[in-house]
Image (tube, helix red, strand yellow):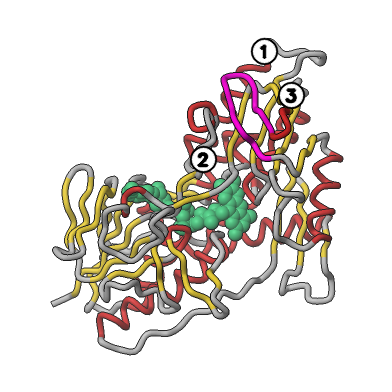
Amino acid sequence: MAENVVVLGSGYAGTGAIKALEAAGDGDVGLTWVSDVDHHLVLHESHRCIRDPGVREKVVIPVEEITSPGTSFRQGEVVDIDTADRTVHLADGTVEYNYLLVCLGSRTAFFGITGLREHAHTLKNIDDVLGIHEDVVSRTAEATAADPVRVVVGGAGLSGIQTAGELAELRDDRGLHVEVVLVEGLDQILPGSDPGLQAALRERLERRDVRIRTGEFVGKVDDDTVYLEESIELPYDVLVWTGGITGREAVADADIGKDERSNRIHAGRTFRTDDDRVFAIGDCALIDQPGNDHAPPTAQAAWQAAAVAGRNVVRAVRGQPLRRWTYDDKGTVVSVGEAAIAHDVSLAPFVDTFGGLPARTLKKAIAARWIRDVAGTGRALRAWSEM
Ligand SMILES: Cc1cc2nc3c(=O)[nH]c(=O)nc-3n(C[C@H](O)[C@H](O)[C@H](O)COP(=O)(O)OP(=O)(O)OC[C@H]3O[C@@H](n4cnc5c(N)ncnc54)[C@H](O)[C@@H]3O)c2cc1C
């Protein structure tokens, strides 16, 4: 009889794993896919909807465009995992599994900063992104050049930088009175990345009139002011927080080895957790890498891991040895509105950091390739112009 493999989450990790499982399984694997939404969101391009909500159609891919007929999909919110009973508890029922692949992504970390959770927009699903557009645009009705809508974006990682870029593009496309401020607690934007890339991104953002403040952590937020360290006050109308990620509450009580503070699940290089029947990938997991390291919480890593994890779960079902995975950093491509900056990309080994049409085309190609892999060439072609 077929073993039931259950995949939780429809982000890059879950969607990629479903495709890999469908390709590798051969009647010996029954597939059940569970997510709280009925679609896959191309999250790493979702910031485009801040400028143009019409892009929604391009970045939201219904599950029925992704799955093969044999895969069953169940929409529901995971609230707990009982590993002893091999049962996933949903808000409205249960799903039993023989093997489980957890791909629940991350939630926003607020680091206990007073007022932040209550006042900030986050960026985790399509409603979040559309909510930012709506909030900014609705406030511009009253704005003037002397009194613009003040938007503060907290956190200058991939999401914060690309969000600030889209806000600038929205402002300039529509001639709106909007001021964009990007705040980063560490000394540089895109912390931990190459200085050349950081400098190129800063130059591009500043050219688009994004004000950047680095080296000052957010200490407190109330309903109209962000308080930075050293008593600096930043008045705001709209606040977007992209300053960090943490694991999902849904696995907090599950008997699976995890970081107790963040709930991110410990997984070995085969993606197996300390429970033989449970695997974990994507942002919800801390996946071992050589040198006591972990895979980064990026779409690129989730995408790569999913292809191997899907095949590994099938190998586990068949009692075959599992493959070990090593993350292969293929470089970074970051958008700033219509422009993009690429760094250290394996496709262009002789150029370090570049922008212009090549970087912009590469950014589009990355998104289009992913969309083609999960939902076919037609959908990828239709999305091309908006990426
Ligand atoms: C604006 C933005 C720009 C980004 N840009 C880049 C980039 O340029 N390059 C890059 O590599 N990365 C980028 N990232 C990061 C990247 O998007 C994430 O690392 C990636 O989405 C992680 O994939 P995942 O599948 O682990 O999680 P997610 O994509 O977050 O998917 C998690 C899934 O689980 C579902 N889910 C969550 N909780 C539950 C529950 N309790 N029950 C049922 N289902 C649940 C969610 O609905 C979702 O389908 C960006 C992120 C943002 C927000």
Distance, label 2 to label 1, CA atoms, is 30 Å
Distance, label 2 to label 3, CA atoms, is 25 Å
Q: Position of residue 26 (x, y in %)?
A: 27, 79
Instruction: Report the magenta residues as a range.
Output: 217-228
Mark 2 or 1: the one toward you: 2
Quarter of the image containing the N terminus?
bottom left
Could you tell me which residue is drawn at 62 percent across and 19 percent down?
Answer: 224
Q: How many marks?
A: 3
Distance, label 3 to label 1, CA atoms, is 11 Å
Mark 2 CB lies closer than 8 A to ligand 1: no
Task: Give the residue number, with chain letter if any, for mark 2.
Answer: 110
Q: Which sits earlier in the primary sequence, circle 3 or circle 1?
A: 1
Taking depth in this image into account, of 187 and 343 the one nearest to the observer is 187
Taking depth in this image into account, of 342 and 238 the one nearest to the observer is 238
User: Mainly helix, strand or loop, the magenta region?
Assistant: strand
Q: Of all residues shown, which one is farthest toward the top?
A: 142
**Relative to 153, residue 10 above or below:** below
Relative side of 333 to 115, left or right: right
Task: Give the residue number, with chain letter if any, for mark 3.
Answer: 178
Task: Give the residue number, with chain letter if any, for mark 1.
Answer: 141
Q: Which sits earlier in the primary sequence, circle 2 or circle 3?
A: 2
Classify mark 1: helix, strand or loop: loop
